[in-house]
Image (cartoon, rainbow, N blue to C red):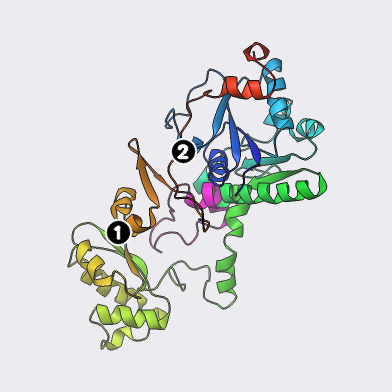
Amino acid sequence: MLQGVRIVEVEGLGPGPFTGMLLADLGAEVIVVHRKGGAATPGMPEQSILDRGKRSIELNLKDPADIEIFMALVASADGLIEGFRPGVMEKLGIGPKACHARNPGLVFGRMTGWGQEGPLSTAAGHDLNYISMAGAAWYASDAGDAPFTPPTLVGDIGGGSMYLAVGILAGIMRARATGQGTVVDAAIYDGSAHMMNLMMTMRQTGNFGVTRGANLLDGPHWSRSYSTSDGGFMSVQCLEPKFYAIFLDLMGLAEDEAFRAQYDKRSWPALTERLAAMFAEKPRAHWETLFLGTDACVAPVLNPEEAAAHEMNLARKTWHENDGVLQAAPAPRFLGTAEWTPPPIPMRGDHTKEILAELGMDEGDAA
């Protein structure tokens, strides 16, 4: 879908590389600039899933000769991805002003936690910090527990990578129409807050206040996960009355008067305790068999390996294992495209000679 789009990605952490992977998954040519002589980020593999489908060149962005190579890449690109703290690219002499002087149509994508400006713009932080300050972590976890979300998903990926990708694509559309590039300031803080607007819409009807555990989706007995007898978990979220009725019927509670007042907040704690006791009586497999394929809106909580082995994945082929590496296929899907198989993951600098040759250079031009 993005064939003919070239993205230059400066090696960085989490959300920046994920954006590059997402665009590569969609067909863009992504060239990642790895640090010359560098090593993988601690905790990350030498060959990262986030680099799949990309090409790699090693450059020293503190060396004038390599900066000239970098700027030649910039001149050939539609977009750029960088995730340094504000001001770092400028100090290196490759900030937006310098890059736009070489390529006026470039979309300069910047990925940060707090944004390019503001009182925290130069402060360190991580996913949980950004979404906490943005208000997006407030409703995470049960009312009596400290808020905690799945690591990286809400902030780094949802509030960060996805918004940077959309911003870059919007900028490229504008550049192709006008010849004018732009700078995309993608702050995880901003994106995480923006994702709250669906919940803010529910707040307009009084269904989401500030009290944790007393709201439409974070308090009811029909919107939470329950432990099973074998240490597994089942998720329940039968919001609509017609689905709630199916849930009660399958649980043998259709005639139980206490469960009929679905939206009575006063009854939620007691009914939660009753359901917790019921789910704890039998193993997860029992509940999976009971609910699978029904409209009760109940599903098992699977780990990635279990998800890959589940019949849902056998049909959708969402999870793939290639050379011992488990990874998820690109999303969304497009009708009429070939079935996806995992593309190669480059080693650092694998394509340095190849890319230099395309730029009319050789290794003698590099530092």
Q: Quadrant of residue 10?
A: top right
Give, as a single range, the part of the protein colored magenta: 130-158
Residue designated by label 1: 311
Residue 43, compared with residue 206, is above or below; it is: above
| Relative image position of residue 29 (x, y in whole percent) | 60, 38
Quote the CA–CA distance across marks 2 and 1. Answer: 24 Å
| Relative image position of residue 220 (x, y in whole percent) | 39, 73
| Relative image position of residue 198 (x, y in whole percent) | 57, 67
Residue 232, compared with residue 84, is above or below; it is: below
User: What residue is drawn where x is 34% and y is 49%?
Assistant: 304
Dot 1 falls on a residue whose secondary structure is helix
Q: Quadrant of residue 261?
A: bottom left
Residue 164, compared with residue 268, is above or below; it is: above
Q: CB under 8 Å between callouts 2 and 1?
A: no
- Estimate how packed mark 2 is, as few (under 14), some (14 to 19) or many (20 or more) residues with alpha carbons within 10 Å: some
Q: Is residue 312 left or right of residue 263?
A: left
Residue 150 drawn in magenta? yes
Q: Is residue 348 left or right of residue 286?
A: right
Residue designated by label 2: 343
Q: Main secondary structure of the magenta part?
A: loop
Confirm whether residue 189 shows in the render: yes
